[in-house]
Amino acid sequence: MQETLKILVVRFSSIGDIVLTTPVVRMLKKQLNAQVHFLTKAPFVTLFKNNPNVDAVFQINDSIKEVISDLKKENYDYVIDLHNNLRTQILKIRLGFAAKSFNKLNWEKFLLTSFKKNILPDVHIVDRYLDTVKFLGIENDKQGLDFFLSESDKVDLSIFPNNYIAFAIGGQHATKILPTEKIISICKKLKQPILLIGGPDDALRGEEIANACSEVVNTCGKYTLLQSGFLIKEADFVISHDTGMMHVAAAFKKKIFSVWGNTIPEFGMHPYMANEKSKMIEVKDLSCRPCSKIGFDKCPKGHFKCMQEIDENLFLNE
């Protein structure tokens, strides 16, 4: 009888990137019947709360030193590094287990952001994650992303209007986020009620938007991450920047209008196996775009054309 493989998957952050790893852990569990453990940062442990494909979750707060001893005791057959940075390189050396690392294509991204030379493969990051475990015989099951909810994550929808649009207004960097006045203008054009989705950092901006518009409800900072996921799941459709909630919406096969500023879908992180009615909204053919694979606190050029020039009529539900 073949021994059960014990595998540690590593991805420290963030919400979207971790949701994008869910096909890997599902296939390791279902195709190999492996014992799957996951290592991430403490704020993201909640993402695994209901995931039946993950047997154990380890977390770090500040340093990998916090978990080295416990991880060594697990005697893993393989470490699957889907983050691949200096910290994970040190982790793999310290653990000494067989390891396979995700190719981040940093050089190719540098050429694209710095010189606008695109030699990136036309392959979604999920499929590149899966390439990392191909040596184990894993084959794509074409089931898309996972985002698991429990009964306790459900929200009383009776307090909200029916047939609402979920508008995820947040993002890690300012250059990935529509200006507030632009969001207000878009909300006023839409003919359906809107729920603004976001974390505590988005709460004040959410209030400003809600106060300026009728039929807009600000839920930012009022619900947990998983509860916000439930609100995404129950929405008529979803508007989101290139951020974590976009991938949560993709997990629920929602129609998504994704908004792209300084980043571009060609980086391979657009909604995976998206609903066929989804659309990607962007200003194409800007000579300065993409200016970063991540983002900035403000537009390096000062004009922010990638967001300011987005056609607001593209958000109308056809």
Image: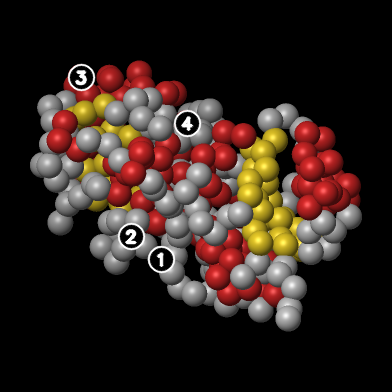
Secondary structure found at label 3? helix
| Foreground label between 2 and 1 | 2
Q: Which residue is mark 3?
A: 211
Q: Earlier in the sequence, mark 3 or mark 1?
A: 3
Residue 253 badge: 2
Q: Does residue 137 appear to the left or right of 285 in the view shown? A: right
Q: Nearer the viewer, residue 191 or 13?
A: 13
Disc 4 versus disc 2: distance between alpha carbons? 27 Å
Q: Nearer the viewer, residue 100 or 123?
A: 100
**Dot 4, crowdedness within 10 Å: few (<14), some or many (≥20)?**
some
Q: Earlier in the sequence, mark 2 or mark 3?
A: 3
Residue 185, image quadrant: top left
Residue 179 rendering spot, x and y as whole percentages: 35, 30
Q: Which residue is mark 4?
A: 174
Q: Amino acid at mark 4?
A: Ala
Can the viewer see residue 45? yes
Secondary structure found at label 1? loop
Q: Are marks 4 and 3 in contact (CB under 8 Å)?
A: no
Disc 4 versus disc 3: distance between alpha carbons? 22 Å
